[in-house]
Image (tube, coloured by chain):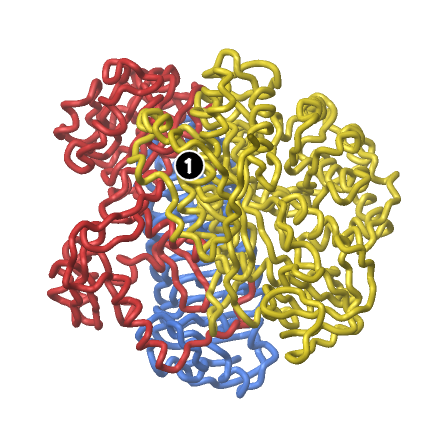
Amino acid sequence: MLRITGGRVYDPANGVDGVVKDLCIEDGRVVKNVESGRTINASGMMVFPGGVDVHTHVAGGALNFARGLVPENQRVARKFLHGGDRRSGIGGMTPTTFATGYLYAGMGWTTVNEAAVPVLSAKHTHEELHDTPIVDKSCLLLMANNEIVLDLLEAGDLERARHVVAWMISAAKVYGVKAVNPGGVAAWKWGKNASALHESFEGYSSLTPAKIVSGLAQIVDDLQLPHPLHLHCNNLGVPGNVATTIETMQLLEGRRAHLAHLQFHAYGGDSWTTMRSGAAAVAEAFNAHPNLTTDAGAVLFGDAVTITADGPWQHLLYQLTGRKWGNLDVENETGCGIVPYVYKDHNIVNAVQWAVGLELLLLIDDPWRVFLTTDHPNGGCFWRYPEIVQLLMDVDFRKEQIKKLPAAARERIVLADLDRQYSLYEIAIITSAGPARSLGLSRKGHLGAGADADVAIYPEQPDEGGFLFSYPRYVIKAGAVVVEEGDVTAVTEGREFIVQPGYDSGIADFIRPLFEQAYTMSFENYPVEIERLKRPEQITLRPAE
Amino acid sequence: MITLTLKNAPHVPLEAEALSPDVMATLSNEAIRALPVLLGKRQRRLDDFFHVEGEASDELAIEGDAARIKWIGRGMTRGRISIAGNAGMHLGAHMSGGTIDVSGNASDWVGGEMSGGLIRVAGNVGGQIGAAYRGSHTGMRGGTILVGGTAGLEVGMRMKRGIIAVRGLVRDFAGLQMKGGTIVLGSGAELRTGAWMMRGTILSLRPIPLLPTFSYAATYVPTFVRVYARHLGALGFSIPFEESDGAYRRYTGDTSVPGKGELLVWSPHGA
Amino acid sequence: MGGKITCTLGEVKNRADFIVYWGGNPAECHPRHFSKYTLTQKGKFVPLGRKGRTMVLVDIRETPSARAADIFLQIRPGKDFEMATALRAIVKGHPTDAQVVEETGLTVAQLDDIAHRMKRARFGVIFFGMGLSMTRGKHMNSGAILTLAAELNAFTKFVCMPMRGHGNVTGADVVLRYTTGYPFGVSLSRGYPLFNPGEFSTIDLLVRGDCDAALVLGADPGATMPQPAIDHLTRIPTIVLDPKVTHTSRLARVHITTAATGISAGGTAYRMDEIPLPLRPILRSPYPTDEEVIHRIRTVVATKTPWIPQPLATMANA
């Protein structure tokens, strides 16, 4: 039992805006009152629901591939020393599994959504999540380039496609559906891409990215998955991709969808020399489409590692920069591309990218629909989120940073004209309450009775030279105090949320011969055994009749 | 002057980055003796292994066979280390100033990613001297490494600036992926010299096998060689430059990248 | 800087029309590679099967794998790096020195032909084996092939994959990477992972005598390593966990017989393309599994004074 007393509580889901009140915890949940147990005196501190990262890359084949590509990053990254029940590890841009849990918890983030999982290597993802301590997890399954599904969509057999998708979700033991560069990753199997929403692509004749997007959005809604289709739009990173993004939003009218890392999809201009911010147009369209949520995918200056299923984009980045390049195509399903990268404040394109993420966060009206991410580690590392919070909350600080940008960049952005400042209440929404709601995790992101007791307690003023939110004084996970005075003091094990959608049991017989043609392993070995997950929590769904 | 005499040779490698002028310059004798060193996984005191005389100096004299002692002079910015004996891996890695002298042999990674200063090893060295650590884009960015004996693999790998001069034979991949700077091969090298180089100069005083991606350009004595000869001569390393003695055959490459590096191979008259 | 451009084996099965085996002998070392993944299967996009594919074998001698090849390039020993580097130039249309090229045992015309075929392939793949990765040049030989494949993507779809050795070496690589950040050669002596091949890799540690105890699991260094390494293993306390009494067992202080993984012990293995596969044991064994033995050792170690490494201010970040 635990009582947190004297702290200023921010709980937007329950309308609590900086009210000094007690918070009581028992058996891992928030309760109305406790009679005994420990008391934490949180006077002079702020009490937030634990952070929820709706889009990050922390576990599985792609991330592990990246780890191997960048030993020089690991060498200078933060070190986690072995000791007690603390395992050793490396932080940095591609943290090792144990370190990932310590880093997130150390910041006050308690739920993490791994955004890209192939079915074929889902066992690997679960193995890594199994070794990621403290935080709760969910994952999203890559579907928009799964050729068994694409063939069905091309044939117009949406119903069967729905059963296949449901079977895959069940086989992979995941929480939701991810679409990356629909059609483009399939085309990349032949070295091509899919840049036009309404044109077919290599390997297909009538199927278009638009039809994949609509088809999958409908399937996800029909399956009543708690989280909408999570979509990485076509033409990521391409100057002028504003048009694709807005057109995609129009395609999704009448459906739920979550647009991933919107910053990378909000560029105007038509070439690298004319590239400029398109955030205003994208934000305006987004504001007009209340069925959508998004996450920022903001860029921070410094080192990053781009890891994405968008293979063709990564080949281009490799050719543009001459940096290291990793690529792994996954049979039938998807692929990944990796290019370690550095965002430089004197580089005009990078400066525009930096501005666009912030512009979107400031121009999108409803904080319940836009969430704080950097598409870790693509735009920057998750443990730098507090820097973005400062840029959102402090317009003077923000304008100082804008002055440091090259003049040519400042002409291409609107950020200097934006005076909006986020309040703490709004920060609590974009880092916790909003993403929790979007993920459909009803016990996360709030501090009302019945909520999971995931709480982050921060000083009201940051440490000297530091950022607010970098060093919580206390972090509580499922009612256990896991971080005290910036140190992980207890290592607990989180849960993994999975969904079990309904599907026609005969669909496995449909899949089997297609599987045997496309794959090179035994069908019996394809699904993930539930025993591989540590503390799974399953939500059983019924499809719409 | 601080004198450190090895009294117990470590039976597994000893990691001793504490052996640096920057660390010891302001410390008392007692504090120096208590400096941490790592014997495998066990943290020990410096004086478990060394007699220590002197204090608060940026001149260190190390005596004894330190072949198993790693990271001597790591990151140093000033002062001097003289080793009467051998030295272990990573000697002078990341250093940016000061001088290190070794009377015996050193191991791999001498001057790894250094950016300034001077390292002189009278005997042989291992591989990866002045090189980039694994995965890193750039090796040595400045400074000088002089070797009296032989050297191992990947000498000057991905170096960007600075001079490496080796009197004895060098093994494969000298100048691998070089980006700039100069390597002098006093006795030539084995295979794959200059592999994938982008820029920089490799000067060999003996004929060397070439990769198929290098092509002959000209025979002459480039002017800068005289300048380098004077500079290296002052450091005790001589390279020929008199037209009466011979000339350098210049090869450009590596076309596989493509790179604009050069190999200058000394061709004495009458050869 | 190059990179690693690869795919899972199903992609090769269904798309590859140009397959190169370089420095490996799959007919004998990966006996079902041709039939399962690369040559004989009818692929979704290679409906003619073997007839729709060209296979090139590059090796220093004509092995049984050469019988399956359409083109056999007999390269001189120790010339793989030169050949790959020359191909990188030729593919880009940059000059090479014909005379030096011919020292590889192949002519410029042969290399031009291969480069042309690679660029014209619809989907090319190079599999490289220990004939490359374990001969003079080592990781640079591997790097040369990988970089060549990466650069061919400017012209067509091209991937590259190492032919991994026996046992679950890929699994060990994967797990080490996600727990320590590095695939092999990891030192934990400082309390956190450090990586440096040549410093912390096994053969080098043993040859230099840099360790004072050894635990050997699922490997037989006593059969394969250089004599100085074997001598050192004999000198220090060496513990072996293996289903069989191996060469290493015979020089070890302790040998513990364990159940054979995949036959009597379960778990997960990673295939050479990093796909995880469950192992389903079919026989019972009287011996404990490797995992059980390690747990029991750890339980005893836990009763000793705990090792709590301290951060050292002297080792600041680079």
Is B164 on the left-hand or right-hand side of A113? Answer: left
| Residue located at (63% from left, 57% from top) | A109
The C terminus of chain A: image quadrant: top right
Relative height, residue A159 to residue B85 (above, below): above
- Please state the horizontal and vertical placement of residue A359, each as a whole percent of the image: 78, 39
Instruction: Look at chain C in the picture and name its colour.
Output: red
- Residue C273 drawn at (x, y percent): 34, 38
Q: Write down the residue under mark 1.
A: C4
Q: Residue at x 43, y 18 (%)?
A: C93
Write down the quadrant of residue A130 in the picture: bottom left
Identify residue type, mark 1: Lys
Rendering colour (chain B): blue
Q: Position of residue C64 (x, y in %)?
A: 12, 29
Which chain did the image draw in yellow? A
Query: Is residue B94 placed above or below C116 in the rendered structure?
Result: below
Q: Is mark 1 on a helix, strand or loop?
A: strand
**The N terminus of chain A appears in which quarter of the rendering?**
bottom right
From the viewer's side, name the closer residue of A358 and A21: A21
Position of A135 relative to A198 (above/below): below
Q: Which of B256 and B99 is in front in this view?
A: B256
Which chain does the residue under circle 1 lie in? Answer: C
> Mark 1 packing: few (<14 Cα in 10 Å), some, or many (20+)?
many
